[in-house]
Amino acid sequence: MDFKLLPSKWLNKKNGLEVRRDDKADVSGHQTEHPVYSLQTEVNRLFDDFFRAAEMPMFGRTFSLSPFGDLDSGAITPRIDVHETDKELRIAAELPGLSENEIDVSLSRDVLTISGEKKQEREQNVKGWYRMERSYGAFSRSVPLPFEVDQDSCKATFKNGVLTVSLTKTAQAQAQTKCIPIKRE
Amino acid sequence: MTGAIAERKEEVATPQSGEPVRNRRVFAPLADIYETNERIFVLADMPGVDEQTIDITLEKNVLTIEGYTSSQTEAGLRLVHCESPEGNYRRVFLLSEEVDREGIEATVKDGVLKLVLPKSAKAMARKITVKTE
């Protein structure tokens, strides 16, 4: 009876609906998984697939339930924009209120990490707050890179609260883009 | 002393003073506002803006801050991932009577605009000493 709950079995003639299942078959290896467990596996796989699809494939932006998650969560994860040319990748991160000495940019083989700490600057003798929308604290953001970059020719500049990291693609990565000619038949 | 700066929530998509000529999005910068005994401080996050591209106007009791960012226009440069769409900044604050309009100072550093609004002498809290008779 419980076979009906398993969509994966519907198309399987051998273990089809009409086959009566007995416990001995389980032990002997025909049916290794208990049907309830395999149902659970199915459901788990569905959830996994859904969340994997919901994540942006590039640059490690994770799935957020709230469309305003970034602004309202008080998170200080810097927002990034990524521009690309044939030769380089340019990552711009918004880091208002930090100075270049407070930011760390590091590159491992294929992950760029921007981290630092934003300290709260305020006057002495603050009597009252009307509004506190900006956030402070330590942050770190890792950006997976879609191709190999030349480790030695990376540059980072900081201007007006915007950090720009330029990464040059390796000759190999540049060569990977190949034009495929279309023939007319 | 609450209500010294009443912040006017602005529908950012449609600025109140006329139609925008250029088709750019407008964002309200996030701000911190706090006060000490003598001054009110406003800090606004406006990454990408410097002293040349910031406009602060005070009309009667309406203080408007506007910032203009430049877009990346370089041949062959294409946007592949975007979290902070380009656009300008605009936010309007209503000042109360206690702010000394002449003494307002503004500085911008690392993409943060800092406004210092001194309170007028009249509005400052005074301590009254009690004498014994």
Image (cartoon, helix red, strand yellow):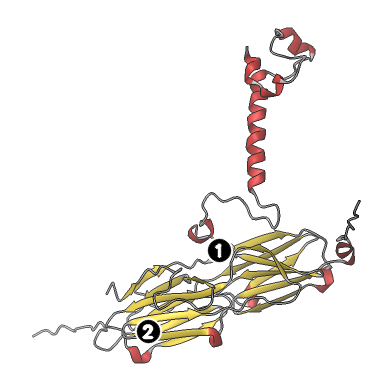
Kindly tell me whether residue A122 is visible in this rendering.
no
Give the quarter of the image for residue A80.
bottom right
Can you name the residue that lies furthest to the front here?
A185
Which chain letter goes with mark 1?
Answer: A
Viewer-closest of A39 and B68: B68
Residue at 13% across, 85% down:
B131
Give the quarter of the image for residue A143.
bottom right
Q: Is residue A116 left or right of residue A165?
A: left
Q: Position of residue B13 (x, y in %)?
A: 46, 68
Q: Position of residue A82 (x, y in %)?
A: 69, 66
Can you name the residue that lies furthest to the left here?
B133
Viewer-closest of A181 and B7: A181
Q: Amino acid at mark 1?
A: Ile
In the image, residue B121 sits, relative to residue A57, either above or below, namely: below
Whether callout 1 and callout 2 share a subunit is answered no
In the image, residue B90 sits, relative to residue A30, either above or below, namely: below
Alpha-carbon distance for marks 1 and 2?
27 Å
Residue of label 2: B117
Q: Position of residue A109 (x, y in %)?
A: 81, 60
Q: Report the disc number at residue A76.
A: 1
Quarter occupied by the N terminus of chain A: top right
Q: Please tell me how crowded label 1 is: few (under 14), some (14-19), or many (20+) other residues with Cα within 10 Å.
A: some
Q: Amino acid at mark 2?
A: Leu
SS for dot 1? loop
SS for dot 2? strand
Which chain letter goes with mark 2?
Answer: B
